[in-house]
Structure formats: structure tokens, C-alpha cells
């Protein structure tokens, strides 16, 4: 059996391999270098610098937004100043995943897609607040609903992931004709960052309508194929609150 060379010893040392890979752009790491070997694949998909694992060296008050997600999922990361500026779920097809028949769409929605496990910011919040504000027809004067979603380490969840953000946003379109969304991160008075996903919805779908059935099918077509999803009404329980809520505009 041949003796390991100096190069092979370095590449098989996790800490040294992480240092070598650190300067490489995230997209190249994910799309190309994960295919080099099982070692490369394992190290890359467990790297804090790629937002797959919490980075304890970053102070909570100096949180960093995941650059890969900011580029790929830009609809969620634009600074909004008015609710009417929120993008709608209908834009996800054109701006994020591609149209039916597009090869990148199938890659994007596959169950094992790496973006689903990516942390949105470093260090990651352990809690996501979801706020639904109904603004259509019969819901015009309703109070907002809220869910506080916890990410538990004992379940292998190390913080808020893009998979959770995506699933919650898309799943609301199963119940409402129009869904607009925005993601906000605030850190005040030296406290860890707080993340809020705001959803403006309405009106409710009429399941007896043929047009609504087709529209619901369109919503299903942008749903991730992952077995574990963060769907509203399933893992995310929205409950009406007794007062108006202020959205933390950026």
C-alpha cells in the first residue's frame, strides 16, 4: 500500500482543507468541488463559512447575511419600506426557480438540494417569527396572526434555514389567492438578531372554482420535493393576536 503524500495528508485533514477551500466562491464550492471526493463533499456541506453550520466566532450584533442566498433568493432580501412593495409568490417562478421544463428548476426543487439546509445569517437565530396580515375582501379588517417557530438542536436544527423560509412562504399560496412576503432582521441594544417573515395574504381561495384549482396546482409546482417541509397549518401554527403588530421595516 503506497504511503500517503504530504498533499494527501493535508487534503484529508478537515481543518486544513477548510482553510484551503475558504477563499473559493460559494457557488463554485457547491456546484463543482462537492463532486471532487466524498471528503470534499462532507467538509463543504458542514462548513460554517458556507452557512451550513453556526459560526461561533461572529458576534450576534455583527451578524452576516448569507451571500449565496442573498444572490439566489433576492426577493426575500430587498429592503422594503411599504407593504405594497412586497414581491408576490407568483414571481418565484421567474426570479428564483425557473419555468416548468427548465433543467435548473428540477435541480432546485430536488429533495436533497443543499440550499434548504443553509443558514440565512451567521450566527443563526434559533427562532423565526411568522406574521400573517390578511388584506383581502372578507379579511380586510382582521387582526394579524402570528407563529413563533423554534429550531431545536436536539432535532438537528441549528438555526433558521432557507428551507424553512421558502416552505412557509410557498405554503401560504395554497390557502390564499395572493401572497406577498418580506423577510426582516433586526438587532437592537446588543441583543442577538431577531428574524421576522411577514406575509400579506388575501383573499382566501375558493376550492370549488376551476380557476382556483388551476391556481393551486401552480402553487404546488413550486413546492420543494423534500420530505420534511415547514408548511403553514402543519409544522407552523398561525394564531390570531389581539392587537395590531408593527413590522420591523429595514
Image: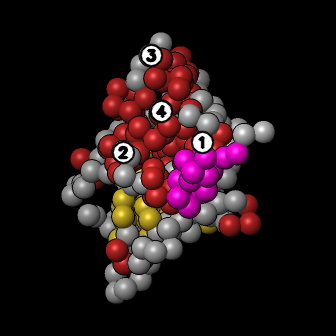
Mark 4 sits on what residue? 32
Residue under label 3, please give it: 102
Indicate left or right for 243 with 110 as reference.
Answer: left
Residue drawn at (37%, 86%) of the image: 190
Q: Position of residue 244 (x, y in %)?
A: 39, 69
Image: 35 above or below 237: above
Q: Residue 186: image x %, image y %?
A: 35, 71
Residue 104 higher or lower than 50, as above or below: above
Callout 1 touching callout 2 (CB < 8 Å): no
Residue ranking furthest to the front: 2
The Cα atoms of the two marked residues, 1 and 3, are separated by 26 Å
| Tag 2 secondary structure | loop
Disc with the residue nearer the chain's start (4 vs 2): 2
Q: Is 171 a magenta residue?
A: no
Mark 3: give few (<14), some (14-19) or many (20+) Cα within 10 Å. Answer: few
Which marked residue is nearer to the observer: mark 4 or mark 3?
A: 4
Q: How far apart are marks 4 and 2 (CA)?
A: 11 Å
Residue stretch rendered in magenta on the structure: 3-17
Q: Nearer the viewer, residue 144 or 149?
A: 149
Say which residue label 2 marks.
25
The residue tagged 1 is 41
Task: Bin the neighbour count of mark 1 within 10 Å (Cα to Cα): few under 14, some 14-19, many 20 and up.
Answer: some
Amino acid at each position: 500500500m503506497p504511503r500517503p503524500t504530504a498533499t494527501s495528508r493535508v487534503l484529508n485533514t478537515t481543518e486544513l482543507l477548510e482553510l484551503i477551500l475558504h477563499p473559493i466562491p460559494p457557488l463554485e464550492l457547491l456546484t463543482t468541488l462537492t463532486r471532487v471526493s466524498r471528503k470534499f463533499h462532507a467538509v463543504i456541506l458542514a462548513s460554517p463559512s458556507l452557512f451550513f453550520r453556526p459560526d461561533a466566532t461572529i458576534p450576534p450584533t455583527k451578524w452576516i447575511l448569507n451571500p449565496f442566498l442573498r444572490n439566489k433568493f433576492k426577493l426575500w432580501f430587498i429592503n422594503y419600506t411599504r407593504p405594497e412593495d412586497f414581491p408576490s409568490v407568483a414571481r418565484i417562478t421567474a426570479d428564483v426557480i425557473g419555468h416548468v421544463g427548465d433543467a435548473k428548476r428540477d435541480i432546485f426543487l430536488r429533495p436533497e438540494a443543499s440550499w434548504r439546509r443553509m443558514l440565512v445569517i451567521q450566527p443563526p437565530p434559533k427562532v423565526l417569527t411568522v406574521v400573517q396580515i390578511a388584506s383581502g375582501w372578507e379579511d380586510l379588517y382582521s387582526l394579524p396572526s402570528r407563529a413563533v417557530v423554534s429550531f431545536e438542536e436536539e432535532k438537528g436544527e441549528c438555526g433558521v434555514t432557507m428551507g424553512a423560509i421558502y416552505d412557509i412562504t410557498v405554503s401560504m399560496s395554497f390557502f390564499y389567492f395572493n401572497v406577498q412576503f418580506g423577510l426582516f432582521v433586526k438587532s437592537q441594544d446588543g441583543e442577538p438578531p431577531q428574524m421576522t417573515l411577514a406575509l400579506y395574504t388575501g383573499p382566501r381561495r375558493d376550492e370549488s372554482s376551476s380557476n382556483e384549482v388551476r391556481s393551486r396546482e401552480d402553487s404546488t409546482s413550486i413546492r420543494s420535493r423534500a420530505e420534511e417541509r415547514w408548511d403553514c397549518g402543519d409544522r407552523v401554527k398561525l394564531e390570531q393576536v389581539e392587537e395590531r403588530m408593527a413590522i420591523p421595516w429595514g
